Image: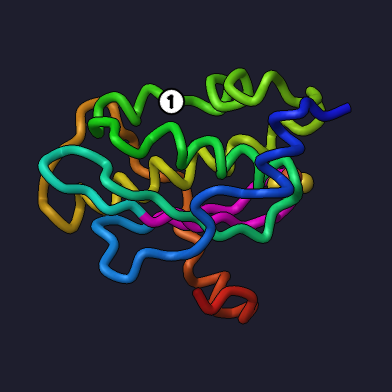
């Protein structure tokens, strides 16, 4: 059901954790399953120097976030914006259709972290839309994420 690459990134996820002095942090929830993802980005001179993630999502969410963080490190903000959940799934040699919604967590949390970076630095990133929902409040209410 899962490709070897998905299994590899699920069993040995890259870039799990947090960045203490992150330039931008994004947290999103998956509307379909209620799972949560948090992405941290370190950005210098418009280049993503480091990316880390934490998730309460399933194996497909772990694998797609692992791959997404691998793909964005070293990229410019503009290049990173072009990385979609579909391109992440392709880089993993595909995901079962029923799990495609999980890969949205990676894309949306990445965008939310870029949005946070833009807000903190008072800049506008062309083509980046405001994240639909800030789930920090719910997160604290639920007490489910102390990251
Ligand atoms: Fe929730 Fe996959 S089932 S992220």
Nearer-the-camera pick, 147 or 34? 147
Nearer-the-camera pick, 129 or 11? 11
Nearer-the-camera pick, 34 or 51? 51
Left or right: 134 as drawn, with respect to 81: right
Left or right: 27 as drawn, with respect to 64: left
Which residue is depicted at the point 24% across and 57% down?
23
* Residue wearing tag 1: 83
Residue 76: quadrant of the picture: top left
Q: Where is residue 21 in the image (x, y as percent from the top left)?
A: 26, 68
Please, is residue 85 above or below residue 117 in the view?
above
91 falls in the magenta region: no
Give SS at disc 1: loop
Tell me the chief SS of the magenta region.
strand
Mark 1, ligand 1, within 8 Å: the answer is no
How many numbered circles does the render carry? Answer: 1
Q: Which colour scheme is used?
A: rainbow
Q: Where is residue 62 in the image (x, y as percent from the top left)?
A: 65, 47
Nearer-the-camera pick, 88 or 32? 88
Which residue is depicted at the point 27% across and 42% down?
48
Q: Where is residue 116 in the image (x, y as percent from the top left)?
A: 29, 54
Which residue is depicted at the point 82% across and 29% down?
2
Residue 46: quadrant of the picture: top left
Q: Residue placed farthest to the right in the image?
A: 1
10 Å neighbourhood of mark 1: few (<14), some, or many (≥20)?
Answer: some
User: Magenta region: which residues?
Assistant: 26-40
Left or right: 19 as drawn, with respect to 31: left
Q: Where is residue 33 in the image (x, y as percent from the top left)?
A: 75, 49
Quadrant (top left/top right/bottom left/bottom right) for the N terminus: top right
Which residue is depicted at the point 70% across and 55% down?
34
């Amino acid at each position: 059901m899962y490709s070897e690459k998905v299994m590899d990134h699920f069993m040995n996820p890259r870039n799990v954790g947090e960045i203490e002095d992150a330039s931008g942090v994004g947290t999103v929830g998956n509307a379909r399953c209620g799972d949560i993802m948090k992405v941290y980005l370190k950005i210098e001179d418009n280049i993503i120097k480091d990316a880390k993630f934490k998730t309460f999502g399933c194996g497909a969410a772990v694998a797609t976030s692992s791959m997404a963080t691998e793909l964005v490190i070293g990229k410019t903000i503009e290049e990173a914006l072009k990385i979609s959940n579909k391109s992440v799934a392709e880089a993993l040699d595909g995901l079962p259709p029923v799990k495609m919604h999980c890969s949205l967590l990676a894309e949306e949390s990445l965008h939310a972290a870029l949005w946070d970076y833009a807000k903190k630095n008072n800049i506008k990133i062309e083509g980046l839309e405001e994240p639909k929902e800030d789930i920090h409040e719910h997160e604290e209410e639920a007490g489910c994420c102390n990251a």
